Image (spheres, rainbow, N blue to C red):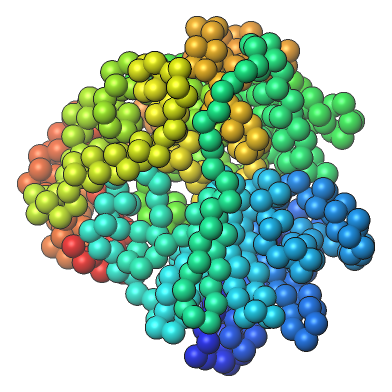
Amino acid sequence: MSGLVGWIDFDRDLRRHRPVVTAMASTLAQRGPDGEAVWTGEHAALGVRLLHIDGVAEEQPYVLPAGEHDIVACVTGWPTGTEAVRADLAAAGVRLPASAGPTALVAYAYREWGADFLPRLTGAWAVAIWDGRTEEMVLARDHLGGQPLYWTRTSTGMVFGSERKVLLAHPEVDPVVDAAGLREAVSQALPHGGIFSGFDRVGAAEIARWGRDGRLRRHKYWSISTQPHTDDYDTTVATVREILARSVEENLTDDPSQLLVMLSGGADSSAVAGLAADSLARSQRGSLRAFTIEFKSSEFRADVMRSTHDTPFAQEVATHIGADHTVLELETGDILDPIVRVGMLKSKDFPTRQYDMDTAQYLTVQAAAQEGRRVVFAGYGGDKYFQGATWFTHKDLVLSGTFPWVALAQKFGAKNGFGTGLFHADALAALGFQEYYRDVYATAVAEVEYLPHEDEWQRHMRRVAYLMNTRFGIDAGSYSAAGLQLRTPINHPELVQYAYNIPNEMHNRRGIEKGILRAAVADLLPQSVLDRHRSASPVSNHPDYPAGLQRAMKAVLADPQAPVRQILDVEAAGQVVASLERLTKDRMARADVELMLQLNLWLDHYRVRLAL
């Protein structure tokens, strides 16, 4: 259930092209360590890489007869809310096989009701359904887009898959990136979409259909909406607790030995860990396993994104909830390893703007996979839905008139966004960051709906909340690259809708960000953690890291064939890497070098042709 691929083409007999579909599926080997399966029909083909959880070895692609034709379904991720659908099928007289898992359920439900049942599924999932009766491919994603699904056209059809690399494996698809794609990859407008020329993705809460006429019909079945919040404070706290506890319960594995919680000692991950440990204890299913990231030989330093050191708080939470806790200590050299750089790149298929932070997570989940874990719980979503991000708490960023995270970068001198300081003038002109931010921001905030009684400040805060809800996706790439399934219980559509309309003064009643979330789990966590302000994921402060960046960038500058030279301001880059002290003390300069190094690797490894 970890990765899917597909191809639809009415001008070819795809039964003759099974090797192409197999090659596409093989690009997802890291997502599904438990096997591979391919189905081919005359004009449609589907393939999967399989990840078995709780001992469930589900048949995929699942072929269900429907009269003279077949319905063929693939599911990736972990849909919840399936019991209600299963009950309604039983009430309708549909008998499912005793061993039917989520994919069989999707196939039977689709045969009974078409795609109308899909909005009833929660959790993170993506589905592909070939309907042989209508000769139509149906693609869909969950409410919040927790599982990706990309697509692109071929000369006579369409291919799709869980990662961009699936599409690049098709013989008719070339890795071309135009100005719009490069800008999308490196800017901070978010979210990241297709990036490669001609690539797109099925949107969150979207159902898309492709038939014989070659048109993709797209329908959005859900979005957050502005509504009056009528509950008082205590009722609000209780409602958040009830929805979140239910979501945690739905996402728990039957076998706790397959589950791991990423624990930072912050409110989000601690809330999820506390609820999971409480559920396991009440049902006597065992204890919880937790991992925390730490950089060995690197002292913690507070900065604009990090207020306190994670490890002491994480250890206190683990002791309090009775979790089996490991602090995974990383050496700076671990994240500088060229093999790790390539692995990190392939987990995303494009460069990350926060290499050291993201790579620490990548290495941590790799270690978790080596323990035999299959599912990782994480607290992603708390900052988005409960007003926890930095830009919610800084008035100048709220009132900036642009994306507040762009305004934060500009506040520290990065006028085109974090990591963009080493593009040469021609590349900057082609990318047009300033106009792009202005236009995309205007389009985004035009979608916001307000309540009649909201004053100007409340309208500003709602805009930020809307942008956080709609522009920040969940990137599970590093987890999938380790053969792990990421589950994020805070990302439940009912909870997201409810939290979006909680007034900001109620969110901040306790005088600390994410006050409602903290109050909802106050009985489960130590007071010190409930009072801890938000702090971003750790980064290395060891001098070996900037020294490693300096060496790597000097090597790029010495290589006249380095592909990044197409867009790099060589003189400016030379000035930055000439000073190790600057790379050590100036995080913005460090980010500029990090991005260019990753762009160079991406352009080379993926054989990207820039068409600016």
Can you say which quadrant of the picture contains the C terminus? bottom left
Q: Position of residue 47 (x, y in %)?
A: 63, 73
Question: Visible in this render: residue 98?
Answer: yes
Q: Position of residue 64 (x, y in %)?
A: 79, 75
Q: Residue 48 lies in what quarter of the image?
A: bottom right
Q: Position of residue 594 (x, y in %)?
A: 29, 43
Is 179 displayed left or right of 246 in the figure? left
Question: Visible in this render: residue 328?
Answer: no
Q: Position of residue 536 (x, y in %)?
A: 45, 26
Total count of labels: 0
Of 91 and 65, the residue lying toward us:
91
Is 57 displayed left or right of 25 in the figure? right
Q: Residue 168 lies in what quarter of the image?
A: bottom left
Is 426 displayed left or right of 326 in the figure? left
- Residue at the spot x=55%, y=7% of the render? 510
Is 185 displayed left or right of 114 in the figure? left
- Residue at the spot x=35%, y=36% of the render? 445
In this view, 422 is above or below 50: above
Of 473 and 214, the residue lying toward us:
214
Of 122 and 195, the residue lying toward us:
122
Of 380 and 465, the residue lying toward us:
465
- Residue at the spot x=62%, y=39% of the render? 493
- Residue at the spot x=91%, y=57% of the render? 90
**Residue that lies at the very extreme toward the front in this rendered image:** 452
Can you say which quadrant of the picture contains the N terminus? bottom right
